[in-house]
Amino acid sequence: MHIHTFTHAKRGTYLNSERVQEILQEISANTDVNDLAVAVYFGVPGLSCRGTAYIRDWHTPQTWHAQRGTWKNANIFPVPQNLPERFRLIRMHLDRPATIYPRAEQDIYGWKFHYTSLEDHLALLFAHELHHYRRYHLNLHPRQGEQAANKWALSRTQDTGFSIAGKRILLKKKRKQKRRISIFDPFKKFRGLKKGDKLLILNDTQHNYQGETALVERPIRLNSKRIVIMTPDGKIWRWPMSWLKPV
């Protein structure tokens, strides 16, 4: 395993590279990490506390620097020397110095952890990403996702002697409220009319039938704006319903 530590000098007190090596080697004991390279960053401006395992594809020294996303902030540091020709890569960043611990936080997967020290935090973060490495590169955890990675990481760090408490918080799901769609139907009063029902003609551009009573000749269709009527002279018309009123 190739381990490389990078610390932003102006951001506080963190762990030295020797202690980082010890922690990662303790967690990865009994795991084949010959193909793994790990980048550990401390206090990089613009980076939150996070870890990412690039396990499905091989990396090379030429792809060490991120080309996009938040990890581009870590490109302020040079590419390490003596990297192998290809490797799987884990990147981790811890944003707070050792002086702020103990520390409690809840991750995006609904787990709440309490870390006694910065060392504990690094150990659990690495164990979580190592689970992904073991799953995808070593085929050791088939069909296990983020929840299983958290569970394994907590057990692994506790078994190794780190002081970490954690549990999954069951979040209450928000009930989706059904949207009430109010549809105004200007012709609702015409929907139940049958043949022979009476209608008052309110408007007639030719002023031949205005004020007279017509009969429904045919019930209206679903999307129609007109209705078929028969005027007193026996003629059939398709009349705009906005110009009519049921009697």
Image (spheres, grey):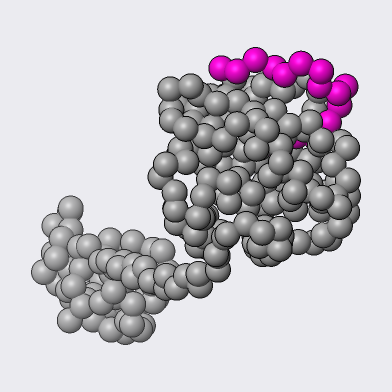
Q: Is residue 188 left or right of residue 7?
A: left
- Which residue is drawn at the image coordinates 78% and 48% (left, top)? 28
Q: State the image coordinates of residue 196 (x, y, percent, origin top left).
A: 32, 84
Q: State the image coordinates of residue 139 (x, y, percent, origin top left).
A: 88, 54
> In the rendered view of the protein, which quadrant contains the C terminus?
bottom left
Q: Is residue 223 left or right of residue 150?
A: left
Q: Nearer the viewer, residue 211 or 4?
A: 4
Whether the magenta-drawn stretch holds residue 84 is answered as yes
Q: State the image coordinates of residue 171 (x, y, percent, origin top left).
A: 47, 70
Q: Which residues are magenta?
A: 76-90
Q: Is residue 166 left or right of residue 218?
A: right
Whether the magenta-drawn stretch holds residue 176 is answered as no
What main secondary structure does the magenta stretch of the protein show?
A: loop
Q: Is residue 212 left or right of residue 24?
A: left
Toward which corner of the image does residue 235 lie, by quadrant?
bottom left
Is 134 above or below relative to 58? below
Is 218 above or below relative to 43? below
Q: Nearer the viewer, residue 175 or 204?
A: 175
Q: Is residue 238 visible?
A: no
Toward which corner of the image does residue 150 lie, by quadrant?
bottom right
Q: Nearer the viewer, residue 110 or 220?
A: 110
Total label count? 0
